[in-house]
Amino acid sequence: MKIILAIDGSRFGDEALDLCKELFGPHQTAEIKVLSVVQRLEPLGMAVAAGAAPYYAQVQNFSEDQTKEFVSSAAKTLRDAFAGRDFEITEGVLSGSIPREIVKAAEEWEADLVVVGSHGGGYWERTLLGSVSDSVVHLAPCSVLVVRMPIEEKK
C-alpha cells in the first residue's frame, strides 16, 4: 500500500500522524511518503517597488526550513514506530498551491491513500480561506482519510 501523509506542522497534522501510526502499524509492508507543501509568497507590486522583495525571500526560506524540520521529525516518528517492519518511509517538501501539489504528488506516485489532518473550520472559514482537506477529497485520484481533532481538544 502506498500512503501519502500530508502534514503542516500543526497539531492537526500531528493528529493525522498519530492515527497513521495506529492504523498502519499492524501491516507488515507499506510505503509512506511524508509530505508538506510550502505556499509560495507572492509580493505585491508596491512591496517590490518599495524594496521588500528580499524580505519575502527571507520569509520563504524560513518557511521552507521549518517545513523540512517538521517533515523530517514526522518521518523519524514513523520510522521509530514501524522499526523492524518492511516500511519504506520517504520525505518530500513541495512548493506551490497546497491542495494542488498534494493531489499532483498522489497522481504521480500512484498513491492508494492520502492521509491529511483537518483544522475543522466552519462554513465561513472554508468559504473565505478555502479548505485543503476538502479540495484534496474532491480532486485526489485515490481514497482520502481526513483526520479530525477530538472535539474537546479543538477548544
Image: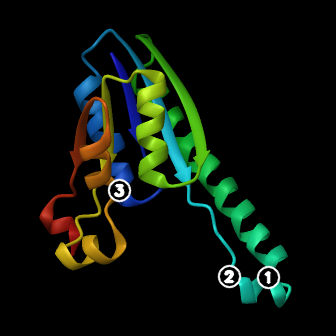
Q: In 3D space, how far apart are the residues under numbered discs 2 and 1 (Cα atoms)?
A: 6 Å
Q: Amino acid at mark 1?
A: Val
Where is mark 2, residue-wise?
44
Image coordinates for residue 101, horizontal then vertical, percent: 49, 44
Residue 48, label in figure = 1
Residue 73 x/y as whole percent: 55, 42
Q: Residue furthest front?
A: 45
Picture quadrant of residue 148: bottom left
Q: Nearer the viewer, residue 58 or 110?
A: 110
Q: Are marks 3 and 1 in contact (CB under 8 Å)?
A: no
**What element does badge 3 sit on?**
helix
> Residue 155: horizontal and vertical position, in percent?
21, 75
Image check: 50 left or right of 42? Answer: right
Label 2 is placed on what type of residue?
Leu
Mark 3 vs mark 1, foreground winner is 1
Toward which corner of the image does residue 130 lie, by quadrant?
bottom left
Seen at 22% across and 58% down, the residue is: 149
Mark 3 or 1, nearer chain start: 1
Q: Residues within 10 Å of mark 1 (few under 14, many from 20)?
A: some
